[in-house]
Image: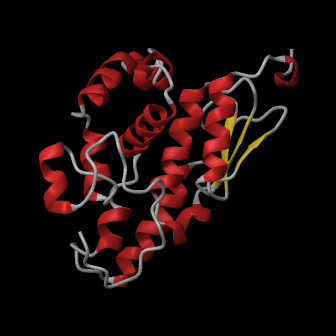
Amino acid sequence: MTSATLAPCPWLQKTAAFLNEIGIKAVEVDQVEGFLPNCRITHGSIEYSRACDVSDLLHEAGHIATVPAQFRSYLDGDVGVGQKRMLDEIAAMDLHPDERLHRAAMQCSDPEAAAWGWAVADHLGIPDELRILDHHFTNDGASHRLSLGMGHHMGVHGLSHGGFCVTRPSLEKYLGRPAFPRLLYWTQPVIERGDMRR
């Protein structure tokens, strides 16, 4: 059975539509394989099939969303290769470690992708058990769901350092960002060199 004969998952369709709305191109194809089953990152966009778990689409989109926009096209297949290219370029810039570009580039790994996916799923109303499946993270998906639901997952701290949110409501008034799982913006913008904003 091909994915074209599968009934479309309404959460998958809703998530793909949302990704396209926020500027992450998500294209349904008949069949595709990538790092995760049934979806693939291709030059900063996502191809997915109807057989894709919504949790996998959210996670892969999280990798794209958390990378500063000027480096998004570097993500192609294995995101680690694109992330390394981005980090090599940033290292060559010899930025101050508190520059926004440096901070954002350091906060776009697996934990941040998981936390970003959780925030989007929360925004869209996707049930918790579909946001991260039990078998994810080497059969530790339930623990990740628990820590993300409580706002104590390490990816939440990464999103906070990347400028997306703050870790708790009491910090909102000081930093002008919403508390996780709400986000200030859905994707990292182009970040200019010399930007020291928090």
Residue drawn 23% across and 50% down?
Answer: 166
Residue 57 screen position, x and y as percent: 59, 35
Query: Please, which colouring scheme is shown?
Result: secondary structure
Number of marks present in the image shown: 0
Is residue 114 among the parts visible in the rendering?
yes
Residue drawn 41% across and 81% down?
Answer: 192
From this view, report whether residue 38 is shown above or below residue 16. Answer: above
From this view, report whether residue 124 is shown above or below residue 85. Answer: above
Residue drawn 45% across and 24% down?
Answer: 132
- Residue at the front extreme? 173
Return the residue nearer the eye: 29 or 93.
Answer: 29
Is residue 77 among the parts visible in the rendering?
no
Residue drawn 46% across and 38% down?
Answer: 117
Q: Quadrant of the C terminus?
A: bottom left
Residue 157 screen position, x and y as percent: 24, 47
Horizontally, residue 68 falls left or right of residue 196, namely right
Q: Quadrant of the N terminus?
A: top right
From this view, report whether residue 111 is shown above or below residue 9. Answer: below
Return the residue nearer the eye: 194 or 40.
Answer: 194
Horizontally, residue 127 falls left or right of residue 42, namely left
Residue 196 screen position, x and y as percent: 25, 78
Horizontally, residue 115 falls left or right of residue 41, namely left
